[in-house]
Image (cartoon, helix red, strand yellow):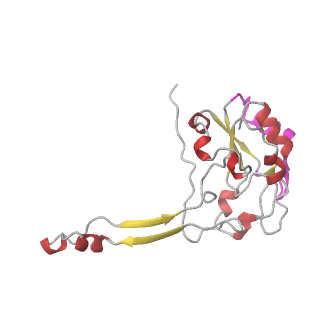
Amino acid sequence: MAHKLIDLSMPVHNDMVAFPRVVRPSMAMYETWQEFAERIGAAKYGVTWLTASCLIVLGDHIGTHIDSLRHLRDDAPGPEGIPLDYCYGDAVCLDFRHLPKGAGISVNDVKAALGKVQYTVKPLDIVLIHTGAGAIQETNAYLTDQVGMTAEATHWLLDQGVKVAGRVSHQMGQHDGGAGASRGHSRELRGVRSGL
């Protein structure tokens, strides 16, 4: 059976909402279409519109990205150390939009969501956590009004052989409702086994 690739990327722009202390992207026109034509001498021959160039500065924690263990440990590999095989493959999307904001997604919540879509997680599956946050990602509520995974649910997924899980959020763990802080982010990921 052929695989179907689904683009999960989010728009990146200068004014996007970012986690506190994470640098927002900077995208600037470096050279316009007309400036390039002038600079290479094409304009004097009537060619006044060629290729524009933009300068893009993008941090490792903005937009659609994958965290590496380097984010948490100075002795771990960065994104280049994540096997590409972990980044594509069978996936399941679990819907947690019904949970109240700030709730922790428990092991039982994960099992119930799997039962609802009649799916059994297998090793190397990618698990997508649907919280509804995509609808608010351009507002400050994006930093606080979401649900997050508990450490127990994250470890349960690891026990099933899951290596990659994703969600529309600036963090994987529970939000406490204050300034984008997370009760679960460091707690759940600090103990992630080195094989992830």
User: Where is residue 16 shown, x and y percent of the image?
Assistant: 60, 68
Q: Answer whether residue 26 is visible to the viewer in this image.
A: yes
Q: Is residue 170 left or right of residue 159?
A: left
Q: Foreground: 145 or 192?
A: 192
Q: Quadrant of the C terminus?
A: top right
In the displayed structure, 168 sits above or below 47; it is above
User: Where is residue 92 shown, x and y percent of the image?
Assistant: 67, 37
User: Where is residue 63 shown, x and y percent of the image?
Assistant: 60, 58
Q: Answer whether residue 106 is visible to the viewer in this image.
A: no
Please state the total of marks drawn on the protein image.
Answer: 0
Q: Residue at x 64, y 58 (%)?
A: 61
- Residue stretch rendered in magenta on the structure: 97-123
Q: Quadrant of residue 139?
A: bottom right
- State the residue lying farthest toward the front: 75
In the displayed structure, 153 sits above or below 10; it is above
- State the residue lying farthest toward the top: 1
Q: Residue at x 73, y 67 (%)?
A: 141
Q: Is residue 129 left or right of residue 15?
A: right
- State the residue lying farthest toward the left: 45
Whether residue 9 is in magenta: the answer is no
Q: Residue at x 52, y 39 (%)?
A: 5
Q: Quadrant of residue 49?
A: bottom left
Q: Quadrant of residue 59?
A: bottom right
Q: Residue at x 52, y 25 (%)?
A: 1
Q: Foreground: 96 or 106?
A: 106
User: Where is residue 45 shown, x and y percent of the image?
Assistant: 13, 71
